[in-house]
Image (cartoon, helix red, strand yellow):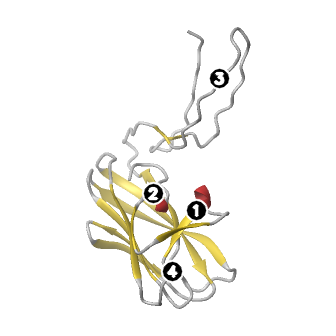
Amino acid sequence: IGVGTPEAESLDLDVYTVENRGKASGGQSIRIFDAPGTQGTAAGSFVGPTGRYDLTATYYNEKDGEATFEVLVHGAVVALWTGVGGNKGAEALEQTFTLDLATGDVITLRGTVGDGELARFDKIDLVSNDPNANIAPVVAAPVADQSGAPDSAGDFTLPGVTFFDGDGVALTLTATQA
């Protein structure tokens, strides 16, 4: 798990399964399709620099039950909340927490099914909370190779989600012809 926006489905899943969900980030989320009380986890090791971070977990609050959601660091619960039965079928909501993380810490999302609520997670956002940090930007959404005709002008616009800066600083990209 690096600084940026890892998708829940990219984590190591135990009991959780990936589902296609049109409104989810990346078109997919994870869910536990099992009986009430069943727990599942989605975990990964933190690869960013040691520091203080804001972690925002995007989850789905459903109207047909009350699932329990947790964030753990090295097995210790650092955040816990319950989906309280939304007004819509499955509404994407966020919970944000400030964490002190060290490189190598294992971050785990854990959900417990509550009645018909399947403890769905979509993604996490991990952003530095240290005003003195200088975290290098990363490629968040790689761009496919581009090609064009020789000796002709080209025009290409990078999608706004191509790069992510963990410090929250606006990025400027400049290109020149060699």
Residue marked by disc 2 = 10
Amino acid carrying mark 1 in the image:
Gln
Amino acid carrying mark 3 in the image:
Ser
How packed is label 2: few (under 14 Cα within 10 Å), some, or many (20 or more)?
A: some
Mark 2 or mark 3: which is in front?
3
In the image, 40 versus 171, the foreground residue is 40
Residue marked by disc 4 = 33
In the image, 147 versus 125, the foreground residue is 147
Residue marked by disc 1 = 28
Q: Is residue 110 left or right of residue 28?
A: left
Mark 1 or mark 3: which is in front?
3
Tell me the residue at 35%/59% (across/down). Answer: 44
The answer for how far apart the CA atoms under marks 4 and 1 are is 15 Å
The answer for how far apart the CA atoms under marks 2 and 4 are is 18 Å
Q: Is residue 93 above or below residue 54?
A: below
Lower sequence index among marks 2 and 4: 2
Tell me the residue at 41%/52% (across/down). Answer: 129
Give the percent coordinates (x, y) of residue 96. Answer: 47, 65
Tell me the residue at 58%/70% (across/down). Answer: 93
The answer for how far apart the CA atoms under marks 2 and 3 are is 30 Å
| Pointers 2 and 4 in contact (C-beta within 8 Å) | no
Label 1 secondary element: strand
Give the percent coordinates (x, y) of residue 57. Answer: 48, 65
Amino acid carrying mark 4 in the image:
Phe
Residue marked by disc 3 = 147
Q: Which mark is residue 117?
A: none
Q: Is residue 5 left or right of residue 103?
A: right
